[in-house]
Amino acid sequence: MLSGDVVNVKSWREFKLLVDEQKPEFVAYVIEQNRSFPEKELVLLRFIVPSAKAQYVFVDFPKGETLKETGIPLRKNKQGTSLIEENDVKDFLKNQLGNHRLIICAY
């Protein structure tokens, strides 16, 4: 049973260490696209590791053509809107976390 606590993790390095320590069965990710204000485009990536104590959450934001902490590239669709490809996220996590048994899923 999960508690209601949410712990914000401040850096990718800290999140990676947390995954190594917690040894979760899975890591979830959320790609968030804000289309409410077309003049102010916002896309971000959220990683979540649930545990019995809390949900650990790390959020990465754009900086230029990539995400600031992870370096995952931002792509553009036909309308020129920035987006994050799911395959880029999955490949990054597999490469960085190195645990081939770790389940990576969209939330």
Image: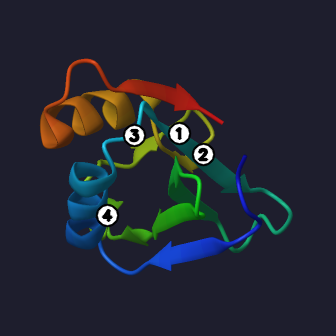
Tell me if 29 is positioned left or right of 104 in this view: right
Q: Is residue 19 above or below residue 105?
A: below
Q: Is residue 62 left or right of residue 96?
A: right
Q: Position of residue 48 (x, y in %)?
A: 53, 52
Where disc 1 sits, the SS reads strand
Q: Which residue is the site of mark 3?
A: 24
For the point 30% across and 48% down, the residue is 73
- Residue ID at (64%, 66%): 41
CA distance for labels 3 and 2: 17 Å
Would you say the residues marked 1 and 2 are in contact, meaning their CB atoms lie under 8 Å apart? yes
Nearer the observer: mark 2 or 4; the answer is 4
What's under tag 3, amino acid-wise?
A: Pro
Q: Is residue 70 visible?
A: no
Q: What is the secondary structure assignment of the residue under circle 3?
A: loop
Q: Nearer the viewer, residue 4 or 69?
A: 4
Residue 70 spot, x, y in % from top left: 26, 58
Q: Residues within 10 Å of mark 1 (few under 14, many from 20)?
A: some
Mark 2 or mark 4: name the one nearer the start of the chain.
Answer: 4
Mark positioned earlier in the residue sequence (3 or 2): 3
Q: Residue tagged by mark 1?
A: 28
- The mark lying in front, picked from 4 and 3, is 3
